[in-house]
Image (cartoon, helix red, strand yellow):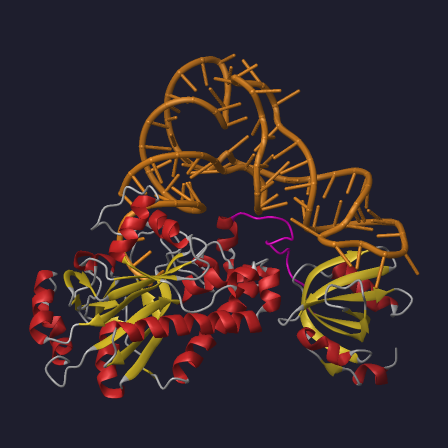
Amino acid sequence: MTTNETSAAKDASISNIQAFNEQDVIIKGWLHNKRSSGNIHFLLVRDGSGTIQCIVEKKKVPENVFKIFDELTQESSLIVTGKVRKEPRSPIGYEISVSNIEIVHIAQPFPITPKEHGTAFLMDNRHLWLRSSKQRAILKIRHTIVMAIYDYFNSREFVLINTPILTANAVEGTTSLFEVDFFGEKAYLSQSGQLYVEAACMAFKNVYTFGPTFRAEKSKTRKHLNEFWMVEPEMAFGTLDDVFTHEEGLIMHLVNEVLSKNQDDLAVLERNTDVLKKIQPPFPRIAYSDAIVTLQKKGSPIKWGDDLGADEETLLAQDYDTPLFVHRYPKAMTSFYMVPDPEDDRLTMNVDLLGPEGYGEIIGGGSERISSLELLEQRIEEHKLPRHVFEWYLDLRRYGSVPHCGFGMGLERAVAWLSGASHVRETIPFPRMYYRLTP
RNA sequence: UCCUCGGUAGCUCAAUCGGCAGAGCGUGUGGCUGUUAACCACAAUGCUGCAGGUUCAAAUCCUGCCCGGGGAGCCA
C-alpha cells in the first residue's frame, strides 16, 4: 500500500457503499464488534448510516496496522481506509478490504455488550443504547413520521403555529399538570396546545401545532410518557366529517411514508409489514352506543356510560385490519369544549381512533368545538374550571365565532404502532417517565 | 395510587430442606488464514439493594424501608 493510493480514497457512507464498488474509501465510525481467526481480522464498523464488515489480512497490511486490531475495543472510534468489494457472504452485499486503520479513541469497556440486557439497565444507559441497531431503526422511523406529519399539513395549507409550553391554563384538569414557578406566580407545563390553536385558526383558518407536551400522570404502562410530542390540527368552519377525513388521511400518509422509506428499519425490527400494507381507507366507524352493544355481545360486562378500557379497545379493534373510529361518546366523559350531538343531547360530537393489533388509542380528542359563548360558559361552570384564566378563550366566541374542529395525535404512540415497539419509551430518544428523569 | 413479580460478579441469571458464592457473556493472557452474538485454552472479578430480627449457621425465614420490571386506572 502506497501513500498515493491512500490519499486517493474518498469519504463514503455505508448506506451508499454500492456506489463505491472497487474503489478506495474512507469510513469514519465506531467499532461495533470484532472477530479474528489469527491471520484475518474482522471489524464490524458502524458509521451512523449503517454497519459494514472490514477485513484486515496480515499479508496485505503493514504489521503495525495489523496489530491495531488487538487494541480496539467495542465502540472505539476509528477511521478505516480500504477498498470496497462485492461479497456474497455479507448481509449488505459488500465488504471493505482494509489498507489502513487510524485510531481516534480507544473506548473503555462498553456497558452494552452484544449479549442480552434488562430494561432497567438499558434505560440507565439510554445515552449509549441509542447506538444499538433496533433503537436506531425505531428512531429513524420516528424521523420519517415527524417529517411526514409536517409534510401532510404543509401540503394542505395548514399553517404551523408554535403554541407556548409555559401556560396558566389547565385544559385537562389540574391533577396531571406539572407546576413551575413563574416569577412568583403559578404556571404549568403545557398539556396541549388545543386552546391556542383554536385562537390561531380564527386567524389562518387551518392551523396545527406540533411539539412536546407534559402530563404529570403517575402512569406505568407501555403507552404513557410524562413528556411526549403531539400534533394538533385545528380547522375553522370544520365539522366532525373533516376530523374523520384528516385523521384517516394523516394515518395513511404516515403508513405509506414509513413503508416506502424505512424498509430496512422495519426489517431490523422484524416488523410484520403485511399488517401495515393491509391498511386502506376508509377506516370503519362505529358509534360509542353501538360499540357498547358489540362489546356486550362479545361477553364484556361494560354498560352504556362506562368508558372504554384497554381490554375493551383491544376487543373492539381485533375485528379489523385497519384503525377503527369510535365516535359520539357520552358527554360525561368528554372535554368541556366539545359540542353536544344535535340528535342526542347525551352525546358529544367527538371521535377517537383505535389502532389495530391491540395498540389502543392512537388519536384522541377529535371533536367539534363549542362556538356558542353561553354554552361554553355553562360548560366551564359545570366542569368547575377557573373562569378567569379562560377569559381570552371566551373572547374567541365574542368576535366572529365559527364552528371549528380538531384532534390530537400522540407521536410516540404512532411510532410505537408503526415500528412494532412494545413500549413508547423506546420511541423517543430520552424518555421522561414516572421513576425516570435521567439520562 | 392499586395489584403483581423481582433486586446475587460489569451484564444476564443459577444456588434443592437454612449448611463452602456458581455459570455464560464481557474483561485480561495465549492460540487459530473467512469469521457472522465466531471458536478453543487459561486467569481475575462479590458489602447477595439498605437497616434490623430469628438461628450454632441467612442470598435463602421474619419486619420495615429503598429501587426497578409487568399490569390496572388516567390518557395521547
Q: Is residue A176 left or right of residue A41?
A: left
Above or below residue B40? Residue A22 is below
Looking at the picture, how far across and down is residue A97, in whole percent? 82, 70
Residue nearest the observer in this picture, A20 or A255: A255
State yes or no: residue A112 in magenta. yes
Question: From where the camera sits, is residue A361 visible?
Answer: yes
Tell me the magenta residue range: A104-118
Question: Which residue extends farthest right?
Answer: A59
Residue at (89%, 69%) from the top-left corner? A60
The N terminus of chain A - image quarter:
bottom right
Q: Quadrant of residue A266?
A: bottom right
Q: How many marks?
A: 0
A193 sits to left or right of A277 = left
Image quadrant of residue A207? Answer: bottom left
In the picture shown, does residue A159 fall above or below A425? below
Which image quadrant is residue A325 in? bottom left
Above or below, A368 relative to B35: below
Residue A342 at what x, y percent from top left?
Answer: 15, 68
**Residue A132 seen:** no
Q: Is A367 in front, or is A335?
A: A367
Would residue A330 be found to the left or right of residue A52 on screen? left
* Viewport quadrant of the C terminus of chain A: bottom left
Query: Residue A48, percent across and down?
Result: 62, 71
Using the image as rendered, state which of residue A3 and residue A253 is in the foreground.
A253
Q: Is residue A90 left or right of residue A266?
A: right
Residue A275 x, y percent position in the rendering: 52, 60
In percent of the image, x 79 and y 61: which residue is there? Answer: A42
Main SS of the magenta segment? loop
Q: Is residue A228 magenta?
A: no
